[in-house]
Amino acid sequence: MGGGSTAGAEHQIAFFLRELTSAEPGRRAAAVKGLGRLGQRLGERLGRRDEHTEAAVRAARDTEAVVRAGAADALGRLGGDGSDTVIVELMGDPDPSVRRRASLAAERLGLTGPAVTEAFRRLLEDDDWHLRLNALLALGSRGETAEPAVLVRLLGDPGPYLWGPARSALYASLRKKPVLELLLHTARHGHGLARVRALDLLPRQHIRGLRDTFLDGLHDECPAVRRAIVGYLAGDLSHGPADTLLSPLGLSGAVDTLFSALRRSGAVESLLPVLRPSATADALLSALGTETDSDVAARLLDVLGRWGDVRAVPAAVRWLDHPRAGTTAVEALADIGTPTAVRWIRAAAVSGPGPDLGPGLGRPDVRKAAATALGGLAAPDATETLLPLLHDPDERVRAGALQGLGRLGEHGLPRPERRAAADALLAHLTTDEPNLWHTRNALSEYPETLPAVRRLITHPSDEVRATVLALLDEDDDGDVALFLSHLDDPSEPVRHEALRGIGRYVDGYGELPDTPPGTPHDSDLLDVMTALSQPPSSQQIRYTARLILDELKET
């Protein structure tokens, strides 16, 4: 450094030192920070580093927090005699901005020793999450660990930056009996997220012994706890003596089938819980009756629905109107499947907008779920209910009707109903482009429509032609010829579906199809596939062509 530069630096430092006596706290703070930055670079060269550190130490006693924070920053850059003790003191400052700067200074200087470690341990309890995180990371970098009780408290921290490392530290110590006992205590008596995450950490064999705790936890004040408890209880149906006797014989599945049939047949619904009692189901049902959180209610409905508990029907009907739990309520009613449940699902499906809103308040997501469920249940009059929904103004409702009709196609429908559904789907193929994917999936369950589908291969819509190709049969020579003839189609979606059709043929036969003379690709189809797997073909065309080539190499 030249003499002029040195003189300029000395002039700046002299200015900072004078500013430290200013009456304005902001000027004093700027001065001590500037002293730290400049002194860090030039202090040793000028032989005045100790003087700069002493000035920063004096600033650390300032009555204004902004100045003390600046002093902490400066000491972290300057170091020097006495700086360690002052930085540790500032880590306990009443102002969080000062504590934060001091903790960063201790890290920058790599301070160690019992006083430093203890200061970081105190910061684990700080109200400022940045400081809690700084402390946790600082202790880890020094080979220290926080006390298990502190780590358990950090499990309840809402920020992932803190509870994640705390969880990892506790997991590494799970074999230690005091840590395990602390987690068990937190799982039984803890609060909020700490209780949930303690449960997640416990080994399975300890979870099984907490059933009574779980039953109490269904009424915990924290929704996250209630939601987690329902998840744990979902695997503990604990039916009565009949299931206890039949499970070891592998016959519990037969009992499930029997009760499912009883529900759907319209057996006296009030008797079903009596025939197959469950204390766990009783507890979940009681919790559902008082639940106010939609996410917890949705989880309760999901479990009770999968268990087929007919007593959950009234609660599911109440939650149909909720924007976050309505679709789950539909699914629960479908799982229960009693005639009463089916009637409510049908009512929700047809509950369109208007002055007299029905169950679900006419919301499209609920109506979509209800329409899909009706098809899956093959409910009486399902076809009659779903066909008008194909003309609903809402795209989502039409999608639900299409999904429902597709599921109906899997069942043995009476011939007139099946014909009506097939005809409606064929008409829909050319009138509802936003739902073509759902229409295609539904038509795939009605193979008798293929002749009519083939006739649409000349339709002016690219998306319709692509859908037609997706529905064609790779085992039919005429359909394979259509795949080949559309590899040069001007529309990329059409070309891609033609290529996928050839891929289905290769999956089934292990070779490329023969190319009839006169077709656009009557030369070597393998060369065509190779060309399509390279630029300038689009990414999706290249990907599909490469899958075909890879399949050919494996055969």
Image: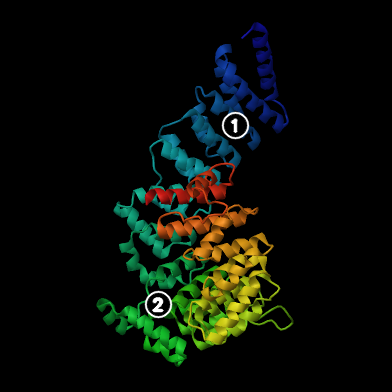
Check disc 2 and give the amino acid type.
Thr
Of the pair 281 and 338, the residue shown nearer to us: 338
Residue 293 visible in the displayed image: no
Residue 270 visible in the displayed image: yes
Q: What kind of element bears circle 1?
A: loop
Of the pair 388 and 553, the residue shown nearer to us: 553
Which quadrant would residue 213 be assigned to in this image? bottom left
Report the side of 475 relative to 386 (left or right): left
Question: Which residue is labeled 2 in the image?
Answer: 280
Crowding near the residue tagged with mark 2, few <14, some 14–19, many ≥20 C-alpha atoms within 10 Å: many
Q: What kind of element bears circle 2?
A: helix
Q: Where the N terminus falls, by quadrant? A: top right
Residue 111 pos. (x, y %): 46, 30
Residue 493 pos. (x, y %): 61, 56
Of the pair 62 and 184, the residue shown nearer to us: 184
Of the pair 72 and 478, the residue shown nearer to us: 478
Question: Which residue is labeled 1 in the image?
Answer: 61
What is the number of the mark on residue 540?
Answer: none
Vertical arrangement, residue 492 with respect to residue 64, above or below: below
Check disc 1 and give the amino acid type.
Arg
Residue 169 pos. (x, y %): 39, 47
Q: Are marks 2 and 1 in contact (CB under 8 Å)?
A: no
